Image (tube, rainbow, N blue to C red):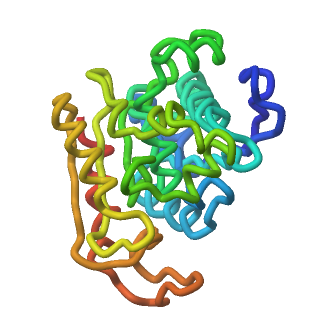
Amino acid sequence: MKFDVETMLEYNRESVAFCGMIPDNYERIDLERKHPAVIILAGGAYWRRSDREKQSVALKFLSQGISPWILEYSVVPRVFPQALGEVLTAVGWLRNHAGEYHIDAENICVCGFSAGGHLAASTGCFWNRDFIQSSLKTPGRLVRPDKLILCYPVISAGRYAHQESICCLLGEEGAQKEELRALVSLENQVDEDFPPVFLWHTATDAAVPVQNALLFAMSLADKKIPLEMYVYPDGRHGLSTGDFTSCGELAYGRQYSCAEWVDKAVAFIWRR
């Protein structure tokens, strides 16, 4: 399924694809049984969306009774907060249409990888800010995700920044403005109404340093936000599901220690 958020998002001027998967027997099951939903945001430094973090991840969740939805959010030349508005619009759309697809409207998760992890974390940081609420015509808590899954996320625009992601997110001119860089340094943006978080990274990530995850975890802990976190001892950036991934330099058929993250994340989603 696809929908155009142009009519719902004032500053959006292009069509955004939002495709979901649901069990083929969802209309025949007990009406009281509802599926959690997860919106998947692939990484790609805000200039592309990596294919290896889309369907392979979605099928893992689908096999565990979770309805996955892949959002092809805007990337360059569109800049902050365009993609953020699209994700929050998608959360609100799913919540409004939950009954049609047997989705639990109180268990909608956003899962992001790398720069997609920054985008997912941004939904938790900014969903209630005036600048985004006014752009979305003040939807209130309708657009607040219930949970976040952050996979080797870009978090900071400071010392440990993935500079390419920050530059693409803000644009070349915006990336030179300290106030904008401070705004998208998400370790400084956590408040008490932040959703519970599942977070994982690898200690040897050479592209997005693990300090991004550690800084964010400290901020979450300071605000007493529920957090489940794993730092795996080895593994390069962009491992996706961590098993049998074939893309670029990733070794096809190798099972990485981080592959367990999917089962742990599934338990996190189902847990009340």
Quadrant in which the N terminus appears: top right
Quadrant in which the C terminus appears: top left
Q: Is residue 181 above or below residue 42?
A: above
Query: Residue 256's quadrant in the figure?
Result: bottom left
Query: Residue 192's quadrant in the figure?
Result: top left
- Give whichever of 165, 100 is nearer the camera: 165
- Give whichever of 104, 109 is nearer the camera: 109
Residue 42: percent from the left, percent from the top? 56, 57
Q: Is residue 255 above or below residue 185?
A: below
Query: Residue 185's quadrant in the figure?
Result: top left
Residue 60: percent from the left, percent from the top? 45, 63
- Left or right placement of residue 107 versus residue 167 in this view: left
Q: Is residue 29 visible?
A: yes
- Give whichever of 18, 230 is nearer the camera: 230
Residue 54: percent from the left, percent from the top? 58, 61
Q: Count the labels in the image.
A: 0
Q: Residue at x 30, y 62 (%)?
A: 210
Q: Residue at x 30, y 59 (%)?
A: 200
Q: Is residue 36 visible?
A: no
Q: Residue at x 46, y 83 (%)?
A: 244
Residue 57: percent from the left, percent from the top? 49, 62
Q: Residue at x 22, y 32 (%)?
A: 225
Q: Is residue 108 above or below residue 254?
A: above
